[in-house]
Image (spheres, helix red, strand yellow):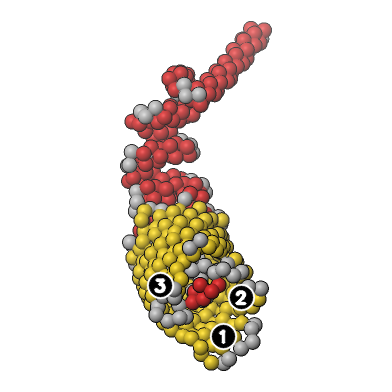
Amino acid sequence: MKNFAVRTYFLIVFTIGLNYSAVGQKVDVDSLLVSALGDVRNNQYESGLKKVHQGIKLTPDYIDFYLLAGRIHQLTRQNDSARYYFNYVIEKNSAYEDAFLYLINLNLEEKKYAEAETLVNKAIAIHPEKKYFKLKKWNVLLTKNEEKEEYQYLKTIDAEFPNEEELRQRLFFLESKINSDRVGVNYSYTTFDRDNYGPWHLGSVQYIRERSWGSLIGRISYADRFAFDESIANGVQYEAESYIFTGKMSYSYLGFAYSDDIVFPKIRAGYSYFQNFKKGWEADLGFRFTKAEDREFKTGVIGIGKYIGPYWINLRTYLQTEKSDFYPAFTLTTRYYFDTRFDYATIIAGYGTSPDERTTLGQFDQRVALDSYRIGGGYYRLFGDHYITGIQATYNNQEYTPGLKQNELELSLMFQYKF
């Protein structure tokens, strides 16, 4: 009995010693991993890699060392070795999400788009709750420049990312490149609180053709102005506009209009360049030329826009000159999008008169030097796949001669058929 007790005592002591040794080794290996990570952060890749290999030799099943080995090889442009270690990690334990991300990026760097897409699909299947893998797939499609596939994919994930500004911006951009045609009519009715002045009527018919290269718009407008209950001026304007895609994230606007009637400028021409940036930002820079009777105006246009969740906010500044005279104007536009680019509510506020305001364009030369404060709101909606409608009301406090002001209320209606 005494010998049994002695043997039991030595067995317990030996077992405790083994466990203590194992725990001590684990602590040492963890310290080794932390030290290797520190070397990588300090760009001491050779030292870090030696420690990684030492850790793998001590604990062959410690996956973190293999992941760090892959990362060091990727940072030192040893891509084949990096690929081996990342694949090893994924095969041994697919819970290591960083291994997927590193290997996807490596495939994108080497333009191995098929491998990158296969891998990101695998990551989504294994980690369906991780939304950043779905965004990573968008990055893969964007990099491989498959716009049709990219658009279809963004449509499927749009609802999951209501606050992803770049996604909404890109979706609308791609939507504009889908082949479609629209015909439509616009009508606006403007009343004035001045006795025996107004109303104004402005109507137009237009055709819009959208293709992968851009869009072409043809428009014919008719204006009729009343005073003392009878028409005092009317006329027709002919207009052509085009939006041309100039890059993956940029496009240009061109416009020209002509009229031989007093209710419109004789010539209106314009150009703007639009550039989209990350985080939902957009900037534009442009020029407008307006010729009204014997006066000519040149306008510089500077705009900045931002998507914030479902909102789009844009501030545009017009720097207008006639000879040595200078007339500024500002327009702030806010939209809240519901579904497509045709479904939104909008609020517009501004100061001054700009050449982009169609209703008052016929009096541009008379109003440009006068004060004007306006605010308006509207609602636009796509019904089914074909019918687009909109309604907008705008209030304008307009100085019509120095020191005298009038209140204007404009109601605009829009209808388009999309096919």
Q: Residue at x 38, y 50 (%)?
A: 141
Q: Residue at x 51, y 61 (%)?
A: 324
Spot occupied by residue 125 in the image (x, y as percentages of width and height): 44, 48
Spot occupied by residue 406 in the image (x, y as percentages of width and height): 64, 78
In which quadrant of the rendered image does the N terminus lie?
Answer: top right
In which quadrant of the rendered image does the C terminus lie?
Answer: bottom left
Vertical order, 297 against 293 (above or below) = above
Compare marks 2 and 1 and give the one earlier in the sequence: 1
State the mark number for residue 199.
1
- Nearer to us in this view, 259 or 186: 259
Q: Residue at x 51, y 90 (%)?
A: 231
Compare marks 1 and 3 and give the one earlier in the sequence: 1
User: Secondary structure under badge 2?
Assistant: strand
Compare marks 3 and 2 and give the one earlier in the sequence: 3
Amino acid found under the numbered disc labelled 1: Pro
Spot occupied by residue 267 in the image (x, y as percentages of width and height): 40, 72
Whether pointer 2 and pointer 1 mark residues with C-beta atoms closer than 8 Å, the reply is no
In screen coordinates, is 263 left or right of 333?
A: left
Vertical order, 31 against 254 (above or below) = above
Q: Residue at x 53, y 23 (%)?
A: 38
Q: Quick one: which residue is furthest to the bottom in this view?
A: 229
State the mark number for residue 267.
3
Residue that numbered label 2 is attached to = 401
